[in-house]
Amino acid sequence: MSFSPLIRQLIDAFRVLPGVGQKTAQRMALQLLERDRSGGQRLAQALTAAMEGVGYCHSCRSLSEEEVCHICSDVRRDEALLCVVQGPVDVFAVEQTGYRGQYFVLKGHLSPLDGLGPEHIGIPELITRINKGNFTEVILATNPTVEGEATAHYIAQVLADKDLSISRLAHGMPLGGELEMVDGGTLSHAFAGRRPIVF
Amino acid sequence: MSFSPLIRQLIDAFRVLPGVGQKTAQRMALQLLERDRSGGQRLAQALTAAMEGVGYCHSCRSLSEEEVCHICSDVRRDEALLCVVQGPVDVFAVEQTGYRGQYFVLKGHLSPLDGLGPEHIGIPELITRINKGNFTEVILATNPTVEGEATAHYIAQVLADKDLSISRLAHGMPLGGELEMVDGGTLSHAFAGRRPIVF
């Protein structure tokens, strides 16, 4: 015994979403069918519109509906600062800090075991962008994971001969964290990077 | 700073799904846009097809694309047994037990505080169905919650004057459960309903 074909198709289709298994997909499909058909219709329309309409910004390579995204086309932003991130979602995270420079979005991180070298994640395009621009500082904001660190290290080496200040985000205690809950590696970084209290 | 309009719309649309908040919706939207546009298109098509094509079975009132669902139209099923459940998803759960009788699907449970009386959850239609059929037993398989029990109790009272055997699913220890983890109410039921071991 199984669901009818259209319901089964819908359940299967929901499983493309991250973190959605059989049971969750089933719950999503039945909830929409039983309670919120207009919400389901809206979701279908939004999906079609976004999948067809959203491309990549020619300048920073983040997701955008325009040729050049609204960050890159904003003339009030600092043209001397470039922040390099691993994916479009990181742009939205960094924006929340108040950063008002330029961005460059890689396609993930270097992963030689998966066959992902510099040219697959867009490092040549990053170099081109830096050569064309007037940057004085490049902030490597890849994730603080082994792969993210390796990617940042590689980019720093490639850029070493240029007249640029290259920086990496600080490691340390997260705000609101508790000492006993923080892992040893982070705590070592927090100790090494300790700051004098200034009155 | 925010996402571009199409991406924002998609994120908002994902929030109709059960258990999906802002962060999860964001992750779903960006994952599809970055990694799986064809999966996103398929999901949109499946949603449209299901929202428009799936209706309710005229006989058991479960979700179905046909006027009469494939369970109700199956002549090999026992016509003397009727299982009453709270929603379409319960039909699929009960089918896994090997039950091969008929179904009737209520629209949830009685909830006087929310203004949901017998006529809102389909109890008059259930009575009509029972009067028309040749049932000898009605199994009340509403959920073992306070609301589900109240609904079962109400239906049992309404059907009391009919020549029908009315039953309710057994309560007891779940298979694979541990005694110390089972709540007191369930354990009381399991003691009261204990069975002699037959050799």
Image (cartoon, coloured by chain):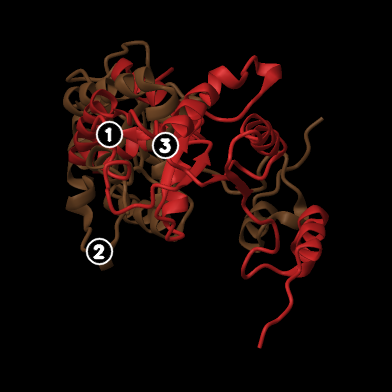
Chain colours: A red, B brown
Amino acid type assigned to the residue bearing label 2 in the image: Asp
Does any portion of residue B90 appear in the rendered image?
no
- Residue in the foreground of this view, choosing between A71 and A77: A77
Q: Quadrant of residue A58?
A: top left
**In the picture, which quadrant includes the C terminus of chain B?**
top right
Question: Same chain for marks 1 and 2?
Answer: no
Q: Can you give x and y, in whole percent of width and height, for residue A99 in the image? A: 44, 56
Q: Position of residue A150 (x, y in %)?
A: 70, 34
Residue type indicated by callout 1: Val
Which residue position holds label 2? Answer: B114
The residue at 18%/45% (across/down) is B124
Q: Which numbered disc, 3 or 1, marks the residue that appears first in the sequence?
A: 1
Q: Nearer the viewer, residue B166 or A135?
A: A135
The crowding category of the residue bearing disc 1, from other C-alpha atoms within 10 Å (few below 14, some 14 to 19, many at least 20), is some
At 61% from the left and 61% from the top, the residue drawn is B185
Q: Nearer the viewer, mark 3 or mark 1?
A: 3
Give above or below for A141 relative to B61: below
For marks 1 and 2, give the CA distance: 51 Å
> Pointer 2: residues within 10 angstroms few (<14), some, or many (20+)?
few
Query: Residue drawn at (73%, 39%), measured in percent from left and top?
Result: B176
Residue A182 relative to residue B141: left or right: right
Q: Label 3 sits on what residue type? A: Gly
Chain assignment, label 1: A
Same chain? Circles 3 and 2: no
Quadrant that contains the N terminus of chain B: bottom left
Q: Nearer the viewer, mark 1 or mark 2?
A: 1
